[in-house]
Image: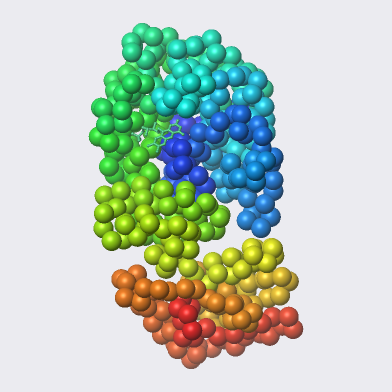
Amino acid sequence: MIVNNLTLCYQGKVILAPMVRVGTLPMRLLALDYGADIVYCEELIDIKMLQCKRVVNEVLDTIDFVAPNERVIFRTCERERNKVVFQMGSADAERALAVARLVENDVAGIDINMGCPKEYSTKGGMGAALLSDPDKIEKILSTLVKGICKPVTCKIRILPSLEDTLNLVKRIERTGVAAIAVHGRKKEERPQHPVHCDIIKAIAEAVSIPVIANGGSHDHIKVYADLEAFRQVTSASSVMVGRAAMWNPSIFRKEGLQPLEKIMQEYIKYAVRYENHYTNTKYCLCQMLREQLETPQGKKLHAAQSSQEIWRQYPPQITPKMCLLEWCRKEKLAQPVYETVQRPVDRLFRSVVTVSEHKYCSALWDKSKKLAEQAAAIVCLRSLGLPEGKLDDAQSPLMHKRKVEERELCQDRENEETLPGGAPHKKPHLTLGTTNHSILSRP
Ligand code: FNR
C-alpha cells in the first residue's frame, strides 16, 4: 500500500463527514473554503457506480461519473482531488475494487461505509450489516488495500460490547487501512442519543492507526473550538463532523461561524457553478434553514420547484460572472477565462475576460480582484446584448447591501477618473467598456 501521507494523513485534521444528499460537490467545496482538511462524498453504492462512465466535463471543468440514464452520480473537480475521500457502500470485495479503480485517480482515498443502519443499506449486506461479518470486512478492505494505490479507510459504528468492538478494530487495522472513522453510537442508537466518547477513546488507545472521532454534533460540537475539545476527550487523531457542518459549514472556520444568509449565498454560488440538481440544492438549504423553515423565507424555499425559483430568493449570488458562465454553458462554449492585473501605482485591479476567443475588459480599474472580474463580465454581457442579472426583491436587506456596494464602486470609479495611468491600452480584439452605474444591478 502506498499511503499518500501528504494528502491523507489524518493527524489533527478536521473532516466533513460523508452524508447522503448533503455531501455533494457544492457542500464539499464550501467546507474546504471554511477550513475542512478532508471532505467525504456521500455514500455511493458500488452497483450504481459500476454502471457509470468517467466523463471529463470541459464546460464545467469537472470529472463526472455518469450513469446510463445520463444522471451524474459523482461529480468532482481538481480543487478537491487531494482532499476528497470517495465513500462507497459495498458488500463485495471484487465490486468494491472495480469501483475503487474507476475513481482512484480522481480522489484522495477510498472509504467503505460500515455504519449505515438504514434498511436500504443493510438488506444488501452493506453498511452496518457488515459489522456482524468481520470476515467480509477483512476481505473487502484487504482486497482494496492490495489493489489500489490510494489510502483505504472505513467508517464503523460501535458494537454492543467493548470487547467485540476492540477485536473488530484490531482486525480492521491488520488489513492495512490508513485510518478508521468511528461513529460512537451503536447501530440501534439514533442521532439524538449521547455519543460514547469513552468507547472511541478505548479504540484510539487500542490501535496505532489514526482514529477519526465522529458523532459529536448534537452535544459536543457547536463552534470551532469544540472540535479540538471533542478530539481530546476521545483521544482521537482527528474529528469528523456531520450535522454541525450540514447546518453551517463554517463550523470549520477558526475565526467563528459565519451568518447563515452568507453561507446560503455561497452555497448557491457553487450549486449554480457546478449545475447541482435543484432538489439537492433545496435539500441542503432546507437543512441549513432548519429552524426557520416556518418563516415566510423558509416556506418559499420549501415551495421552490426549480433552481431559478431558489436563486430568485437569494439574488446577490446572481452576479454578472454567473450570467456569463450560464450563457457560455448554454452556447456550449468553453467557460470564461479571467486574467487580472494589479497596477502598482494605486494597487487597483483590472480584469480581462476571454469568451470564444474574444477579450472583454472594463476601461476602469477596481479596488478588488472580485469587482474587476465582475466588471469585465458586464462589459462582455453588454457587448453581446445579454442580461446581467435578475433582481426581484428590491426591498430586501440583501438588496440594500448590494446597493451600498454598488455606491462604493461608483465612488471608487469617480476617484479613479482623477488618477494617473487609468487610460486603457486598446488592442485590436479587445472590447472595452464602462460599467459605471453598477456592476450588480440590471440596467
Ligand atoms: C449521515 N451519515 C452518513 N454516514 C456515512 O458514513 N455515509 C453517509 O452517506 C451518511 N449519510 C448521512 C446523511 C445525513 C443526512 C445524516 C444526518 C447523516 C452519518 C454521518 O456521517 C455521521 O456519522 C453522523 O451524523 C454522526 O456525526 P455528527 O452528525 O454527530 O457529527
Q: Looking at the image, which is closer to me, 258 or 378?
A: 378
Q: Looking at the image, which is closer to me, 297 or 89?
A: 297
Q: Quadrant of residue 58?
A: bottom right
Name the outermost residue toward the bottom.
418
In the rendered view, would you say 99 is above or below 314? above
Side (left or right) of 91 relative to 19:
right
Residue 337 visible at all: no
Query: What residue lies at 49% left-to-right and 84% top-to-bottom?
Result: 443
Query: What residue lies at 67% left-to-right and 41% top-to-bottom?
Result: 68
Q: Residue 108 placed where, x, y %? A: 58, 36
Q: Looking at the image, which is closer to me, 273 or 223?
A: 273
Query: What residue lies at 35% left-to-right and 60% top-to-bottom?
Result: 300
Residue 16 visible at all: yes
Q: Quadrant of residue 96?
A: top right
Q: Looking at the image, which is closer to me, 222 or 18?
A: 18
Query: What residue lies at 31% left-to-right and 36% top-to-bottom?
Result: 217
Q: Quadrant of residue 403?
A: bottom left
In the rendered view, would you say 299 is above or below 225? below
In the rendered view, would you say 16 is above or below 264? above
